Image (cartoon, rainbow, N blue to C red):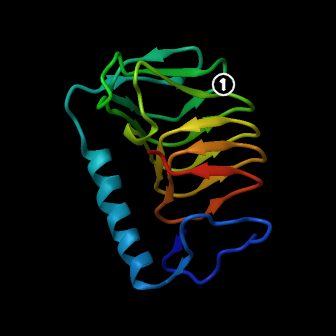
Amino acid sequence: MGVSPGSAVTGFGPGVVTGGSIHLTDTLAAQAKLDLTVAYNDLAGRTLAPVSVAGNLGGSTLSPGLYKSTSGLEVSSGDLTLDAKGDANAIFIFQIASTLNVTVGRQIILIGGAKASNVYWQVGTSANLEANAVFKGSILADQSISLQTGAVVEGRLLARIGGVTLQGNTVTVPN
C-alpha cells in the first residue's frame, strides 16, 4: 500500500496489510505513482478496434477486447461475465470516460480461462463498489475509488489523484 504525495494511511486497525508493506511518500511510493500514470495513459490511449458500450453492463457476457464508454458504466441489473473463450492470455480493457459503479451484491464473473490479472478498468473519474460486490480486475481511476462494506476485489485499486476508501473489504492481488 502506498501514498504519494501524502503522509497518511488511516483506518489501520482493524485493517491488515498481509504480504506487503505501507509506503508513505517514499521513493517506492513516488515511483509507483509515476508508473500508475504511465499505465493509465497507456490504457486510455488504446484505439485498436474498440467496442462501444454504454450504461449498464449487468446481465452481459463479453469476449476479450477493448471496450469504450463515452460516459459512465455500471453493473446493476445482473452480473457481468467475462469469457476468455479458452484463451488464458485473453485481455479485457474497459475505457470509461467518467464513473464506474457496481451495485449491491453484483459480481464480475470470469469464465473460459479469464484471469483477473488480465482485466483492466481505466476510469475517467471515480469508481464505486457497493456493499458485497465481487469485483475482478484492476481499477486505474483518475480520481478516487470507494468500496462499501463487504465488497471483495481480486485485483488492484489505483487512484491517481484522490484516495482509495475501504470499509471492511478484502482485496487480493491476482495471480
Q: Is residue 49 left or right of residue 141?
A: left
* Circle 1: element type: loop
Q: Name the residue type under label 1.
A: Ser
Q: Residue at x 66, y 52 (%)?
A: 146
Residue 86 horizontal/vertical position (percent): 33, 18
Residue 37 is drawn in which quadrant? Answer: bottom left
Residue 144 horizontal/vertical position (percent): 57, 57
Q: Is residue 18 left or right of residue 89?
A: right
Q: Is residue 145 above or below residue 133?
A: below
In this view, which residue lies farthest toward the front?
Answer: 19
Between residue 123 and residue 18, name the one nearer to us.
18
Q: Is residue 117 left or right of residue 171?
A: left
User: Which part of the image, by quadrant, shows the N terminus?
Assistant: bottom right
Q: Is residue 7 above or below residue 97?
A: below
Between residue 36 and residue 156, name the one nearer to us.
156
Q: Residue at x 73, y 65 (%)?
A: 15
Residue 53 is drawn in which quadrant? Answer: top left
User: Which part of the image, by quadrant, shows the C terminus?
Assistant: top left
Q: Residues within 10 Å of mark 1 (few under 14, many from 20)?
A: some
Residue 77 horizontal/vertical position (percent): 66, 18
Q: Residue at x 75, y 70 (%)?
A: 11
Q: Is residue 149 above or below residue 134?
A: below
Tally the numbered discs: 1
Residue 156 horizontal/vertical position (percent): 50, 52
- Residue at mark 1: 76
